[in-house]
């Protein structure tokens, strides 16, 4: 692990029921870094996040974290039980780290929740049931919960899955702002054109790390063929790389 790094994977292999989900992964993240993990379903993207959290242990290699590293995690909103009777305020408060035994929040905790809701454009929604929010608002609520502990590293699993184009851009701009404030970010995404092409660094993974670098270095027909197992063409439009299938259309799910 390089001195000053927040997180480092050193030859990490781990998986489930004896089957490796990722193999011999080397990955490092510096303070203020921003990485997108891309690959097909079942390629090991979420496993990388779980290993970074310490929720799964490597069978080989090491995951090293900076001492005292504060990590925030945002799950896929599609995995959330939206029928659970909880408000926006209560959802964010679940992340409190004060160690208070009393179930009700202190005045300082209320202020912290109000501050993070205001930061994410959710002022006035604290008493609303999370089920009553739009998809973009729901995503921001769980981002607010992760931010309550003032993380140095933010991990997000498919943060734009199941949302419309406008919400996708809102989320991307919000994450860029948080990164500009100094929060390191690692996210998984299947959205090559809407998200991945706009990130500073990408890691293509399909159990093994296929390639890592800038979008210009990684979003190439050769790398995508190795990552997804299917031919994809790449066009450059307005300085941005656009992935299309050989018929000339944007692949489903990547618009």
Image (spheres, grey):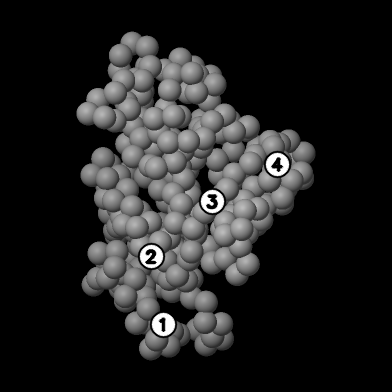
Mark seen at residue 11: 4
Separation of marks 2 and 3 at Cα, in angstroms: 22 Å
Sequence-wise first label, 3 or 4: 4
Q: Quadrant of residue 216?
A: top left
Seen in the image, is 80 located left or right of residue 20? left
The residue to which callout 2 is attached is 144
Q: Position of residue 93 (x, y in %)?
A: 43, 74
Sequence-wise first label, 4 or 2: 4
- What quarter of the picture does the C terminus occupy? top left
> Badge 3: how crowded within 10 Å, few (<14), some, or many (20+)?
many
The residue to which callout 1 is attached is 109
Q: Quadrant of residue 168?
A: top left
Q: Inspect this view and state whether residue 160 appears.
A: yes
Please name the residue shown 22% across and 28% down the image: 238
Please name the residue shown 29% across and 64% down the image: 120
> Badge 2: how crowded within 10 Å, few (<14), some, or many (20+)?
many
Please name the residue shown 57% across and 65% down the image: 69
Separation of marks 4 and 2 at Cα, in angstroms: 33 Å
The residue to which callout 3 is attached is 29
- Select label 4 or label 2 by which is in front: 4
Mark seen at residue 142: none
Relative to residue 205, is residue 178 depicted above or below? below
């Amino acid at each position: 692990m390089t001195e000053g790094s927040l997180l480092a994977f050193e030859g990490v292999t781990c998986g489930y029921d004896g089957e490796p989900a990722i193999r011999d992964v080397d990955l490092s993240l510096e303070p203020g870094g921003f990485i997108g993990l891309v690959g097909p379903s079942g390629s090991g993207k979420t496993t990388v996040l779980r290993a970074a959290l310490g929720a799964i242990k490597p069978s080989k290699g090491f995951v090293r974290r900076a001492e005292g590293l504060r990590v925030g995690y945002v799950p896929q909103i599609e995995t959330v039980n939206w029928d659970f009777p909880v408000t926006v305020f209560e959802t964010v408060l679940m992340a409190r780290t004060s160690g208070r035994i009393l179930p009700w929040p202190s005045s300082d905790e209320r202020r912290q929740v109000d501050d993070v809701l205001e930061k994410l454009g959710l002022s006035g929604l604290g008493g609303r049931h999370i089920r009553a929010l739009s998809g973009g608002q729901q995503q921001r609520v769980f981002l607010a919960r992760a931010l309550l502990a003032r993380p140095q590293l933010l991990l997000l699993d498919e943060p734009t899955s199941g949302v419309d184009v406008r919400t996708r851009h809102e989320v991307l701009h919000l994450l860029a702002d948080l990164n500009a404030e100094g929060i390191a970010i690692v996210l998984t995404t299947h959205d090559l054109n809407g998200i991945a092409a706009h990130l500073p660094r990408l890691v293509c993974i399909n159990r093994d790390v296929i390639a890592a670098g800038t979008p210009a270095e990684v979003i190439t027909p050769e790398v995508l063929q190795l990552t997804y197992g299917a031919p994809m063409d790449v066009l450059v439009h307005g300085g941005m790389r656009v992935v299309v299938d050989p018929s000339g259309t944007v692949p489903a799910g990547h618009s």
